[in-house]
Image (spheres, rainbow, N blue to C red):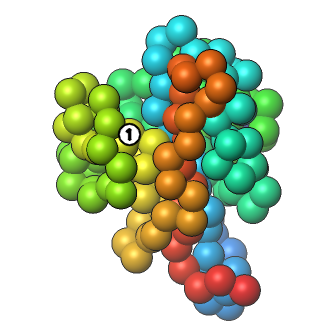
C-alpha cells in the first residue's frame, strides 16, 4: 500500500539504495509503539525524547498500527518512509525493555522491536525506548551498518 508521502513498506523493508561505501549503508530507524489516542505530537515528543529525528531514514511500527493517522501523519510531517513490521518479525526480535507490549504484541517493547527489525541484521539500539510526556507513545532508535 502506498501513500502520497511516505510509502508504507510491507514485509521486509526495502533498504535505501545507493551503492556507496559501507559508511553510507548505515541506517538509523525510529520505531514506535503508541496507544490509539496518540497524536502526531505524541509521537514527535517520543521521538524527541529518544534523541530526535536527526539521521533517521525510516519510521517503523507494528503492521496493525501502521495505517493509524498519528503514525502516517508523523511520517508525512517528517517526509520519511514508514514500515509496517509483521508480527512474526516483532516477536523474533529481542528487546532491552519489558513493558505492556508483551501482552498485545508478544514483545518486550514494540518501539524497540520495530526499530531493530526494520533496521535489519546486525542492528543495535542507540536509544532505548523513550516515553512521550503524555505517556501515549514510545520511540526507540536503532542503527545498522558501519558508522561514519
79, above or below 96, in the image = above
Look at mark 1 in the image and give the residue it sits on: 110
Task: Please state if 122 lies on the left or on the right of 27 as rendered.
Answer: left
Task: Please state if 123 lies on the left or on the right of 100 as rendered.
Answer: right
| Residue at position x 43%, y 50% in the image | 112
| Residue at position x 78%, y 57% in the image | 54
Q: Nearer the viewer, residue 53 or 17?
A: 53
| Residue at position x 43%, y 24% in the image | 65
- The local secondary structure at tag 1 comes to helix
Query: Which residue reaches farthest top?
Result: 37
x and y percentages locating residue 21 in the rendered image: 68, 90
Query: Which residue reaches farthest front?
Result: 133
Residue 69, image quadrant: top right
Q: Nearer the viewer, residue 34 or 99?
A: 99
| Residue at position x 75%, y 61% in the image | 55
61, above or below 127, in the image = above
Task: Please state if 6 lies on the left or on the right of 29 as rendered.
Answer: right
x and y percentages locating residue 101 in the rendered image: 30, 33
Query: Which residue reaches farthest bottom?
Result: 21
Q: Can residue 72 be spotted in the picture?
A: no
x and y percentages locating residue 42 in the rendered image: 66, 23
Point out the image quarter for the C terminus: bottom right
Amino acid at each position: 500500500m502506498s501513500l502520497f508521502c511516505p510509502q508504507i513498506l510491507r514485509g521486509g523493508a526495502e533498504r535505501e539504495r545507493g551503492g556507496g561505501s559501507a559508511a553510507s549503508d548505515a541506517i538509523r530507524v525510529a520505531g514506535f509503539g503508541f496507544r490509539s489516542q496518540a497524536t502526531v505530537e505524541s509521537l514527535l515528543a517520543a521521538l524527541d525524547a529518544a534523541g530526535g529525528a536527526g539521521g533517521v531514514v525510516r519510521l517503523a511500527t507494528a503492521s496493525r498500527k501502521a495505517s493509524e493517522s498519528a503514525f502516517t501523519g508523523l511520517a508525512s510531517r517528517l517526509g520519511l518512509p514508514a514500515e509496517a513490521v509483521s508480527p512474526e518479525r516483532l516477536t523474533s526480535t529481542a528487546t532491552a525493555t519489558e513493558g505492556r507490549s508483551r501482552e498485545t504484541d508478544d514483545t518486550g517493547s514494540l518501539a524497540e522491536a520495530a526499530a531493530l527489525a526494520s533496521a535489519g541484521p546486525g542492528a543495535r539500539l542507540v536509544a532505548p525506548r523513550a516515553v512521550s510526556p503524555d505517556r501515549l507513545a514510545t520511540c526507540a532508535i536503532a542503527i545498522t551498518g558501519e558508522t561514519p
